[in-house]
Amino acid sequence: MKFADRLVGKGLDFFVIVKLISYNLAWMVVLVVPMAVLVASLMAFGGMSQRNEIAVMKASGISTYRMILPTFLASIVIAYLLVQFNNHVYPNANHAAKNLMIDISNKKPTLSLVPGVFSTEVDNYAILARKIDQKTNLLEDITLYDYSDRKSLNIVTAKKGKIYFASDQEKLILDMQNGEIHSTDNFDENLYRKIVFENHKIAMPASQFTFKQSNVGTSRSERELGAPKMQLIVDSLSGVKKRYIKIHDDFLAGNFNIDTVRSRLTSETTSSGSRRMFLQIENKMRNDKNNILSGIRRLVRNQAEINKYKVEIHKKYSLPVACIVFILIGAPLGTMTRKGGFGMAAGISLIFFTIYWAFLISGEKLADRGLFSPFWGMWSANFILGALGVYLTYKTARERVTLNFDFLKKLLPKNFRNIQRNNENY
């Protein structure tokens, strides 16, 4: 929905829009499946408990562990399938979505322009077109402010024009007809120039243009790669990191100190030849020092890249494992609440999934900044909620516990509460 208003009704084929939506649904599947497992387990075990089926099975000698075992095994299968989805379908869907957006932007550069509104998405330019034909990229009643030259301001007006990308995709070309160029000097208010033209082209940088990507259809980001390929990148970056560290250690082991060398050479001799040699050594050492400092900065950036890829690697496995964790939470909680409707299940699920997502988001941000290990950033939520699930399962197996979460229904929309009430009456 983020780009819906810029795509619908602007000359794009319906099938193209459907494809774009389908590709972008992949990341939702990654989040929906664990949530669905939690809701389903709460509804299933809550419904059985509400109908006293749990009590009947326990009276027949079936333990809580045995009741949960089939769903636990099913969650392992779902987790495995979700891992495969994360490593094969999800990255390719993201990459296809990016390439499709690039194709759209190449054919429809006017998608980011709104009639009668100045667009400042191109650096140092403000573009206004009062009429826009999305099918032909034709603009009418154009006004353009050009701030690219700090010494002067150029205001261009034209009756009509066309906007398109250059063949190398690096420039955005605005081809105008029948207009004027008004130029003023920022340092001399008395200087003014007016040029009337029949045809005039302006080449603007396209790097900041909406939907314009720097690497067209070639390189992939971390969310467009599977875990095995990202691990290869991490290994390569780790090798580069070791080389940076070795260079830094060699520099420190050499005990390079410009002040020490200067005082030593000065005390030994003051001849012009020695001074020349000293200046050469000093310049070399300064260059070495600058190289080392540059290497340290590259090392910091290198570590940030490693953390970024490691976070994505762990996320591809921690989210599927959440399916197993939510079974351990949903099954005992469903038994305790003795409510199997959608309203109760959705309310409880919302609480636990919000907690899980808060851990995941904060862990990802801290890991990206190097303040937290990528492993703990992505797995801490599973460990904490998993421990809670084990405790709840043990508690349910040992004794009969009843919990009341009716207040959670107030958190749901009114139509959901009505559906829940009708189901219970039925």
Image (cartoon, grey):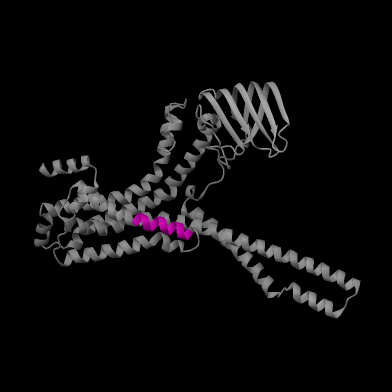
In the rendered image, residue 15, in percent from the top left (x then y), is placed at 42, 29
Tell me if residue 258 comes above or below residue 90 in the rendering: below
Tell me: residue 217, above or below residue 336.
Answer: above
Q: Is residue 132 left or right of residue 320?
A: right
Query: In front here: 148 or 214?
Result: 148
Q: Quadrant of the C terminus?
A: top left
Above or below, comparing residue 138 to residue 254 in the picture = above
Residue 119: where, in percent of width, then height?
54, 33
Left or right of 84? Residue 137 is right
Extent of the magenta region: 356-367
Image spot of residue 4 (x, y percent): 42, 34
Left or right: where 379 falls relative to 206 = left
User: Looking at the rendering, in which quadrant would you find the N terminus?
Assistant: top left
Is 366 in the magenta?
yes
Give the image location of residue 62, x and y in percent.
Answer: 14, 61
Most frequent secondary structure within the magenta stretch? helix
Residue located at (30% from left, 57% from top)? 324
Residue 360 sits in which quadrant?
A: bottom left
Query: Residue farthest to the front?
Result: 190
Q: Nearer the viewer, residue 10 or 132?
A: 132
Specify whether residue 27 is in view.
yes
Magenta segment includes 64: no
Q: Closest to the observer: 365 or 384?
A: 365
Residue at x-position 42% and y-position 54%? 316
